[in-house]
Image: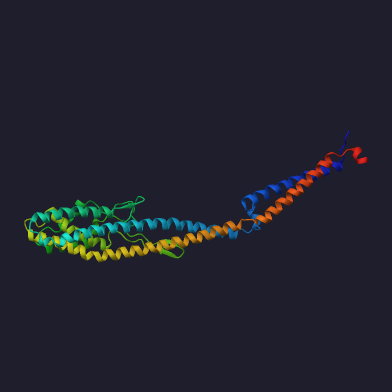
């Protein structure tokens, strides 16, 4: 029968250890050939993780900017859309209001007043617009509608113009109420302006527009002058009512320049945000490539290691097979 000496047993153990090591090399090289990445990043970096950590920190910062710029872009786009609609309402109303002095009947002024009442409600609704559940003209009070009810606004204005007997007096009282901190500013239910928001390294976007902006305030005043006629202001004074309607049209026309300037200012911020998003995205892509390259392997080198390890393993199998077939008779031969 075959007998194994202590030397044979030692050789068998050596071959087993070599076989296990070579199988591990084949497995590791196969995975690296398939994934084109190092199995052991630490070994590839020789224990120095600082370059990889720096790239990861930059990517995390850019991801934060991506979230911020997306929110900022949505806010400014919604504000721009709302301002566009408000401007359209104002443009539609202005022509009729400026012609009010030429109306031949009081009923025409009444009809115009009712229409302006509805338009005022529509404008206030636009100022209460939300995007992703956040009010766009309420400043830091993003969970609050900045404008109250249209009827409450007109009630406050009716009190402010009480006793006025001419269109000029009413228009002056309305203008004063909208400028007075105890008037429109007290009616406003939003918060203070949002602080500048960081959108890129060393760069911030101005998102400070609220419903208290002078361009918005002056536009509301123009609508309100005409809408007050629907509440019976200057009743029994048809000429003064027609004149107040005209004054409302003039106020809307005058506020147009402010609305255009405000839209331009928001448009500039929109362009700034979009430019920052593009730059951040480009940098993130470059850093992503760099990070991928940091852990990547040379496909040719990995394939060569795989073939060498396989060849060595096959040779080891042959040696192991020959050793396992040795016997005393074979040895004596």
- Taking the spot 86% from the left edge, 43% from the top edge, the residue there is 7
Q: Is residue 325 above or below residue 82?
A: above
Q: Is residue 253 above or below residue 15?
A: below
- Judged from this view, the residue extending furthest toward the left is 236
Residue 87: image location, x then y, percent: 25, 60
- Taking the spot 70% from the left edge, 51% from the top edge, the residue there is 306
Please tell me which residue lies in front, 153 or 282.
Answer: 282
Please tell me which residue lies in front, 249 or 333.
Answer: 333
Q: Is residue 270 left or right of residue 170?
A: right
Figure label count: 0
- Which quarter of the rendering shows the C terminus? top right
Please tell me which residue lies in front, 61 or 323.
Answer: 323
- Taking the spot 13% from the left edge, 56% from the top edge, the residue there is 229
Colour mapping: rainbow
Q: Is residue 287 left or right of residue 202?
A: right
- Which quarter of the rendering shows the N terminus? top right
Please tell me which residue lies in front, 174 or 224.
Answer: 224
- Taking the spot 53% from the left edge, 60% from the top edge, the residue there is 286
Residue 113: image location, x then y, percent: 15, 55
Residue 83 falls in image quadrant: bottom left
Residue 187 falls in image quadrant: bottom left
Q: Is residue 2 above or below residue 302?
A: above
Q: Is residue 170 left or right of residue 261?
A: left
Residue 309: image location, x then y, percent: 73, 50
Residue 209 falls in image quadrant: bottom left
- Judged from this view, the residue extending furthest toward the right is 332
Residue 249 visible in image: yes
Residue 180 visible in image: no
Residue 242: image location, x then y, percent: 11, 60
Q: Is residue 203 left or right of residue 301?
A: left
């Amino acid at each position: 029968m075959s007998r194994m000496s202590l030397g044979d047993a030692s050789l068998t153990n050596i071959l087993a250890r070599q076989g296990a090591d070579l199988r591990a090399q084949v497995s590791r090289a196969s995975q690296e050939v398939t994934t084109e990445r190092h199995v052991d990043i630490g070994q590839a970096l020789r224990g120095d993780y600082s370059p990889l950590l720096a790239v990861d920190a930059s990517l995390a910062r850019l991801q934060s900017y991506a979230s911020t710029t997306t929110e900022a872009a949505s806010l400014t786009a919604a504000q721009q859309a709302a301002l566009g609609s408000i401007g359209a309402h104002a443009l539609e109303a202005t022509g009729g209001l400026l012609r009010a002095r030429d109306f031949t009947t009081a009923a025409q002024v009444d009809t115009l007043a009712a229409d302006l009442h509805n338009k005022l409600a529509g404008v206030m609704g636009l100022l209460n617009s939300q995007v992703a559940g956040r009010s766009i003209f309420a400043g830091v009070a993003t969970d609050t509608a900045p404008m109250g009810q249209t009827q409450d606004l007109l009630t406050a204005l009716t009190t402010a113009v009480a006793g006025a007997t001419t269109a000029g007096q009413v228009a002056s009282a309305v203008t004063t109420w909208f400028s007075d901190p105890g008037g429109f500013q007290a009616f406003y239910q939003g918060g203070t302006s949002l602080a500048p928001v960081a959108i890129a390294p060393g760069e911030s976007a101005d998102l400070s527009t609220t419903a208290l902006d002078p361009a918005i305030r002056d536009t509301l005043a123009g609508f309100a002058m005409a809408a007050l006629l629907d509440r019976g202001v200057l009743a029994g004074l048809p000429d003064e009512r027609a004149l107040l309607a005209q004054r409302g049209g003039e106020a809307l026309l005058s506020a147009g320049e402010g609305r255009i300037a405000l839209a331009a200012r928001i448009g500039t911020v929109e362009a700034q945000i979009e430019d920052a998003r593009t730059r951040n995205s480009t940098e993130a892509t470059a850093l992503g490539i760099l990070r991928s390259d940091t852990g990547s392997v040379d496909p040719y080198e990995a394939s060569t290691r795989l073939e060498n390890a396989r060849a060595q393993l096959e040779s080891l199998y042959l040696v192991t097979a020959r050793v396992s077939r040795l016997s005393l008779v074979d040895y004596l031969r």
